[in-house]
Structure formats: structure tokens, C-alpha cells
Image (cartoon, rainbow, N blue to C red):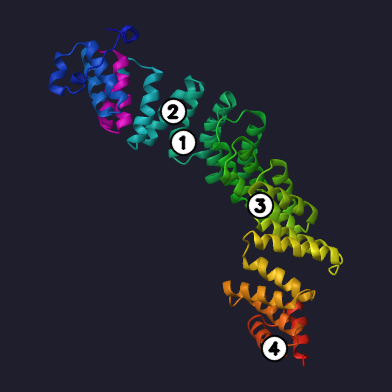
């Protein structure tokens, strides 16, 4: 029967047919053999489908069966020399058939006959300007290391189709073999701006090229594009990493504000930049949202750091109130305890309470020099000079005299009597 009759077959596949062995193939009709072959193809049993279609070709001489046989051989990677011989025999009787050239090129490449593959490619190029033929013909040149010729063919394909996959191959060749990375970037960027991007592969390729160029700005921009279309956490993390690498905290703040994401990261950036009003507003919002009392302690710190007059009584009372409220709601992080205790000590609000709170923070981190410095300062304020000296000496022995506050405390404590 002709190949076109396949469209008229109503197929009901029985696995008893699927399980037939080669010796039983001769008892099947042409229609049954076709069904068998297609079933093998569906299950990617290409070695078996090659045998079926080979049998059909031997029985009928129909080229469609031969071409299916050869295709199955290529997909299975078996019987390549035999397939070449069978196709060459058909080619002698039916010269100038482009379908044959299209099959011979991958057959010769698989069989490492590069020159013969190139000859078939040249023949194909002379007689066809179809994108699929130019694409196929580029492969022998790639195998032979003739990258300029391969690029010429692939560029012609891309000009006709604007296919992303072809462009990605062009970019890879330019990057890895012809030293034209910047040109590859230009082509990819032009495609991105002038066409609808159908997959993330183009963006990933741009990222690879920009990373090789150490172009952090454009790496950042590509991750922004990826995040804009796909709100994945991994893209957001890369964006923040890129801003951190650049040291551009304001850029990171602007991005997070516009996208309304990573509020806790945004809060830390506000603190780092000393944008106290924004940080306080966000701390209030976060406390309302999750009821975590640590935001009360954070707000207390912000209010104190924001104040121009660190001795302002109204401000200090509000700071104390916030710390007390946070502690009553379960906050016991040593960082907050130390800050609160030191404030009570340094401003001489309640020395005994301040020292007790510092000691509580030291239970969590007994060797923390910042906390020991606070305790030494508490002893100094109490005029417990010996305790102050012994405690502060531990700090100096470990940290040296580099930080201004340590120097100030050490000088004062040494003069304590």
C-alpha cells in the first residue's frame, strides 16, 4: 500500500502484535507491519522499528519505508555502514534526491566520514536555500572545525527564521571558537529587544557571556528580566547578590521597594544606610504583621540611633519603654540585651539593672568582647575599679586598641580609683 494510506488506518494496537519476533514478521500484512513499526517508534525501540521498516522496503521498494528505516538506524545509532550502503544503492537509481542528501549527511558524520558529509552538504547548499537544509549543511563544517563557514550558514538560517535555537548555536560558536563573544552578546541582546523571547535559554546564555566578561551590571539586568517574568526566589537572591557585589545598597533598596519583596532584607539595608524613618516605619509594619517582639527592640535601637541628642529624656524614656515591652513579650536575644543594658549604664539611668542585663547577655555569649566591654563600663560607672580593670583588660588583650570606644573606656578605667 502507499504511505498515504496510513492516514486512513484505524489503529487498534494489541500487545500480542508488539511481542511478535522477527521470524513471525513474514506472516503480517503490510498494514500490520506499519502498525508494528509505528508502535516501536512510539516506545523508542528504534532498532526494532528499523528492522520492520527495512522489511517493508524490501517487500515494496517504497522510498518512504527506506527513509524510515534509515531514520530509525540514526536514532538507534546502529547499522550505520549498512544504512549508508542501502541509501547509496537507492541514490544511484534515483539521483538528485534531496531527501537522500539530508540522510547521508548525519550518516556520514556518525560514521566519521567527514569529507563525504561535507560533499553532501555542498550539494545540498547548491540546490536548496531552505533553512532546514542550511542548518543541516552547517554540521559537517562544525565537525571539521570550519567555524566561519558554519556560522555563515547558520546566520542565513537565522535571518530567515529568527529561531532562538539557531541563534543560541551561533552565540556558542562565537564564544567558544571564533573569539567573538561581544558580537554574540550583541546578537542576543538585539534578538531580545526585537522579538518575543520564547524560553529562558537565551537569558541563561546571556548570563554565561556576561559572567565571562565580568560585566556585573548586565548580569544584574538579565536577572531582573528573568525575575520580571518568573518570580522565582533564586532569581531574586541573585539580584540581591549582584547589588551586594557592586556595593550598591541604594540600588538594592530601590529594587526591593518597587517590587515589594524581601522586607526583612530591605529593613537591614535601611539600617545600614541609616534611613531611620523608613526603617522605623517598616519595623512597625513587620511587628503588626508577625507580632514578633524583636521589632519593638529594633525600633528602640533605631530611635536611639536616630536621635541627635542622645541625652534627650523623652527619647530615652520611649527607648526604655520599647525595650521593656519587648523583653516582657519574650525577647532574650543577647544583642538586644547588651544594647539595652549598655544604654542604662552609659546614660546612668539604672546601673544595677544595666549590669544585670549585661550579665544575662554574657550567659549566652560569655566571651563576647562587646558584652565584656559593656560590663566593664558598668563596673566603672559604679566605681568598682578593680572589676572594671580586670574585665576591660580581657577586651584589650583580645581586641587590641583599635576601636575608639575601647580606647575611650580603657583610658578612663585605667584612671579609675
Q: Is residue 187 above or below residue 129?
A: below
Residue 248 is labelled as none
Mark 1 / mark 4, whichever is N-terminal: 1
The picture places residue 14, in percent across and down from the top left corner, at 22, 17
Mark 1, mark 3: which one is toward the viewer? 3
Mark 3 / mark 4, whichever is N-terminal: 3
Is residue 221 one of those drawn in magenta? no
Residue 264 is labelled as 3
Magenta-tinted stretch: 60-88
Asked if marks 2 and 1 touch (Cβ < 8 Å), the reply is yes
Which residue, as the protein is rendered here, is positioned at the far left?
23
Q: Is residue 211 shown left or right of residue 120?
A: right
Residue 389 is labelled as 4
Q: Dot 4: what SS?
A: helix
Q: Dot 1: what SS?
A: helix
Measure how far apart labels 2 and 1 are at the Cα level.
9 Å
* Residue sitting at x 74%, y 84%: 380
The picture places residue 121, in percent across and down from the top left corner, at 44, 28
Q: How many marks?
A: 4
**Which class describes the residues within 10 Å of circle 4: few (<14), some (14-19), or many (20+)?**
many
Amino acid at each position: 500500500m502507499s504511505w498515504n494510506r496510513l492516514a486512513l488506518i484505524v489503529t487498534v494496537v494489541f500487545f500480542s502484535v508488539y511481542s511478535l519476533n522477527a521470524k513471525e514478521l513474514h506472516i503480517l500484512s503490510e498494514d500490520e507491519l506499519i502498525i508494528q513499526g509505528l508502535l516501536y517508534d512510539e516506545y523508542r525501540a528504534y532498532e526494532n522499528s528499523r528492522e520492520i521498516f527495512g522489511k517493508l522496503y524490501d517487500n515494496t521498494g517504497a522510498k518512504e519505508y527506506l527513509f524510515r528505516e534509515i531514520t530509525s538506524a540514526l536514532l538507534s545509532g546502529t547499522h550505520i555502514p549498512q544504512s549508508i550502503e542501502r541509501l547509496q544503492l537507492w541514490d544511484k537509481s534515483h539521483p538528485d534526491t534531496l531527501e537522500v542528501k539530508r540522510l547521508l549527511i548525519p550518516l556520514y558524520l556518525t560514521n566519521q566520514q567527514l569529507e563525504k558529509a561535507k560533499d553532501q552538504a555542498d550539494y545540498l547548499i547548491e540546490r536548496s536555500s531552505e533553512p532546514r537544509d542550511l542548518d543541516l549543511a552547517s554540521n559537517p563544517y562544525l565537525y571539521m572545525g570550519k567555524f566561519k563557514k558554519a556560522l555563515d550558514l547558520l546566520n542565513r538560517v537565522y535571518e530567515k527564521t529568527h529561531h532562538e535555537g539557531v541563534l543560541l548555536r551561533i552565540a556558542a560558536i562565537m564564544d567558544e571558537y571564533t573569539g567573538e563573544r561581544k558580537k554574540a552578546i550583541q546578537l542576543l541582546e538585539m534578538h531580545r529587544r526585537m522579538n518575543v523571547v520564547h524560553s529562558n535559554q537565551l537569558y541563561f546564555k546571556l548570563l554565561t557571556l556576561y559572567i565571562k566578561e565580568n560585566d556585573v551590571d548586565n548580569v544584574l539586568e538579565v536577572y531582573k528580566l528573568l525575575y520580571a517574568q518568573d518570580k522565582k526566589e533564586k532569581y531574586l537572591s541573585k539580584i540581591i547578590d549582584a547589588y551586594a557585589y557592586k556595593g550598591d545598597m541604594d540600588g538594592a533598596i530601590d529594587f526591593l521597594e518597587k517590587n515589594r519583596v524581601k522586607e526583612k532584607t530591605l529593613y537591614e539595608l535601611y539600617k545600614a544606610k541609616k534611613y531611620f524613618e523608613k526603617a522605623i516605619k517598616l519595623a512597625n509594619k513587620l511587628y503588626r504583621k508577625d507580632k514578633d517582639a524583636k521589632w519593638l527592640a529594633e525600633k528602640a535601637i533605631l530611635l536611639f540611633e536616630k536621635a541627635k541628642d542622645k541625652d534627650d529624656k523623652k527619647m530615652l524614656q520611649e527607648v526604655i519603654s520599647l525595650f521593656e515591652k519587648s523583653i516582657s513579650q519574650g525577647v532574650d536575644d543577647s544583642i538586644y540585651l547588651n544594647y539595652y543594658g549598655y544604654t542604662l549604664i552609659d546614660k546612668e539611668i539604672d546601673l544595677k539593672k544595666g549590669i544585670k542585663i549585661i550579665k544575662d547577655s554574657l550567659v549566652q555569649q560569655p566571651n563576647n568582647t562587646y558584652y565584656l566591654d559593656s560590663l566593664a563600663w558598668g563596673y566603672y560607672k559604679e566605681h568598682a575599679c578593680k572589676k572594671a580593670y580586670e574585665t576591660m583588660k580581657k577586651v584589650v588583650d583580645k581586641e587590641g586598641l583599635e576601636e575608639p570606644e575601647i580606647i575611650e573606656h580603657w583610658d578612663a578605667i585605667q584612671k579609675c580609683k
